[in-house]
Image (cartoon, helix red, strand yellow):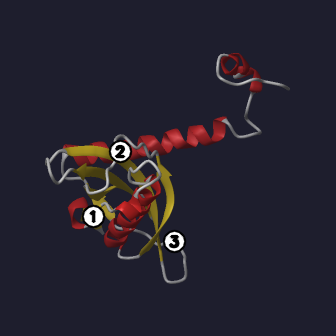
Amino acid sequence: MFKHAKESQVTITQLMLPSHSNFSGKIHGGHILNLMDQIAFACASKHSRNYCVTASVNRVDFLNPIEVGELVTLKASINYTGRTSMVVGLRIESENVQTGDVKHCNSSYFTMVAKDENGKNVPVPGLILDNVQSVRRYARSIARQEQAKTRSTKFHSSEFKIEEHLDFIKTQNAKIEL
């Protein structure tokens, strides 16, 4: 079975309240992460028609601060489907309700896994790629997975070669005392 991404896309908009702010008066990143996890769950569950869990989060960069009183819109869409997993692409924007100015605040990718009632992984519907953008997103997800595999093995303790890194580290804000 295959489904279009638009069948499971989810958008939520929420007013940012003072209770969501950190000590500097900006919206707390943890609150935004919580909203991101919720919408990724909703999108993946809608696509798979199963309960889903977060397996990983790929890169969360906070590009612009979000102010109290702004509307935050989170958009989620399935970018990739594996056998039991899905990559949910997220885009977060904030809007100043007085000026109408919209800022891109964050983009991220959540890998979600579909589970049955017993907590076992279950197959998910494949993704119908119906435009250039959807093919680009799918291919990009595969490339990110390959990069993650390389990152995880290069610095594994059994593979790490300290001599390859010492000269560079000496140019950094660190002191090596071995």
Q: Position of residue 107 (x, y in %)?
A: 35, 47
Q: Which residue is mark 2?
A: 65
Q: Is residue 17 left or right of residue 162?
A: left
Name above or below for residue 8 compared with residue 69.
below
Q: Is residue 123 left or right of residue 95?
A: right
- Residue tagged 1: 14
Q: What is the crowding at mark 3: few (fewer than 14 residues within 10 Å), some, or many (at least 20)?
A: some
Q: Which residue is mark 3?
A: 121
User: Is residue 35 something one can see in this rendering?
Assistant: no
Indicate which disc, 3 or 1, sits on the residue closer to the N terminus.
Answer: 1
- For discs 3 and 1, the disc positioned in front in the rendered view: 1
Q: Which label's residue is closer to the chain start, 2 or 3? A: 2
Q: Nearer the viewer, mark 2 or mark 3?
A: 2
x and y, in percent, of residue 108 in the image: 39, 49
Mark 2 and mark 3: Cα distance apart in space: 37 Å
Residue 5, can we see it?
yes
Q: Is residue 153 above or below residue 80?
A: above
Residue type, numbered disc 2? Pro
Q: Earlier in the sequence, mark 1 or mark 2?
A: 1
The amino acid type of the residue labelled 3 equals: Asn
Q: Quick one: 21 or 155, which is closer to the camera?
A: 21
| Amino acid on which disc 1 is placed | Gln
Mark 1 residue crowding within 10 angstroms, few (<14) / some (14–19) / many (20+): few
| Image quarter in which the C terminus is found | top right
| Quadrant hosting residue 104 | top left
